[in-house]
Amino acid sequence: MQAQDADLVEVKQSGHALFQGSFLHAYEDTVRLPDGSQSTREYVVHPGAAMIVPILAAPDGSLRVVLERQFRYPIGQVMIEFPAGKRDADESTLVCAQRELQEETGYTGREWARAGVLHPAIAYSTEFIDIWFARQLIPGERRLDAGEFLDVFTASTDELMQWCAQGKITDAKTLTGALWLQNVLSGAWKLEWQSR
């Protein structure tokens, strides 16, 4: 915390668990507000995740990205997304990204670069998603988790940006990945690639 933020900080006074699931945990805390009054905060604890922006070089020299179509039960829709998944216990986000890319798409990447981090729901969740780029992709067999169903396809970067602009893609992590991709391709933002 920075010194200039001290007058914004809420301090936990007490708390209790509302729900303990196999994946998510929900809590309610009583907090002291900056003006000395009290309030409650309900929030979900999430283990963190990784998302991958997988870049394929097409035979004609153009770039394509690997995407997925997956039904998302809470909103009742099939969504277009970049590959992603939650971290296992004690797993780095790079290892998570490499595992999820292979499991969901079959691809492995020879080169990887960490772009940054996304906090998708800061008002009510501890979730963070590390954004990774992968290139020099090698196709292979998928290993989907039990109960996981998704379609894998590729799109041009122009198609991706058009779908974002049209509202066909509304997933926050995929929109953030598209923003990173656009800025990387324009040269405005740099990535440090490493062989893995």
Image: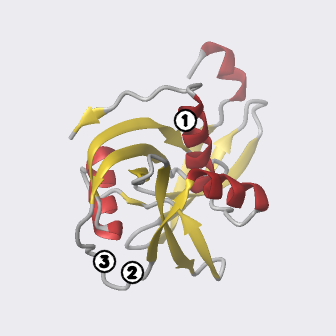
View extreme (top): residue: 3
Q: Is residue 69 left or right of residue 47?
A: right
Q: Earlier in the sequence, mark 2 or mark 1?
A: 2
Residue 9 image offset from top left, x and y in percent? 66, 30
C-alpha span from label 3 to label 1: 33 Å
Residue 27 image offset from top left, x and y in percent? 54, 60
At label 2, counting other C-alpha atoms closer than 10 Å, the crowd grade (few under 14, some 14-19, many 20 or more) is few
Check disc 2 and report its element: helix, strand or loop: loop
Which picture quadrant has residue 86?
bottom left
**Quarter of the image where the N terminus is located:** top right
Check disc 1 and report its element: helix, strand or loop: helix
Whether residue 35 is visible to the viewer of this picture, yes or no, is yes
C-alpha span from label 2 to label 1: 32 Å
C-alpha span from label 2 to label 3: 5 Å
Residue under the point 54% across and 61% down: 155
Q: Who is closer to the viewer here, 150 or 58? A: 58
Q: Amino acid at mark 3?
A: Asp
Which residue, given by chain and number where applicable, does mark 3 sit on? 145
Residue under the point 23% across and 72% down: 141
Q: Earlier in the sequence, mark 3 or mark 1?
A: 3
Which residue, given by chain and number where applicable, does mark 1 sit on? 185
Residue under the point 40% across and 69% down: 23
**Quarter of the image where the C terminus is located:** top left
The nearer-to-camera label among 2 and 1 is 1
Residue 118 image offset from top left, x and y in percent? 54, 44
Is the C-beta separation of discs 2 and 3 under 8 Å?
yes
Which residue, given by chain and number where applicable, does mark 2 sit on? 148
View extreme (bottom): residue: 147
Residue under the point 45% across and 51% down: 60
Q: Amino acid at mark 2?
A: Glu
Q: Which mark is residue 62?
A: none
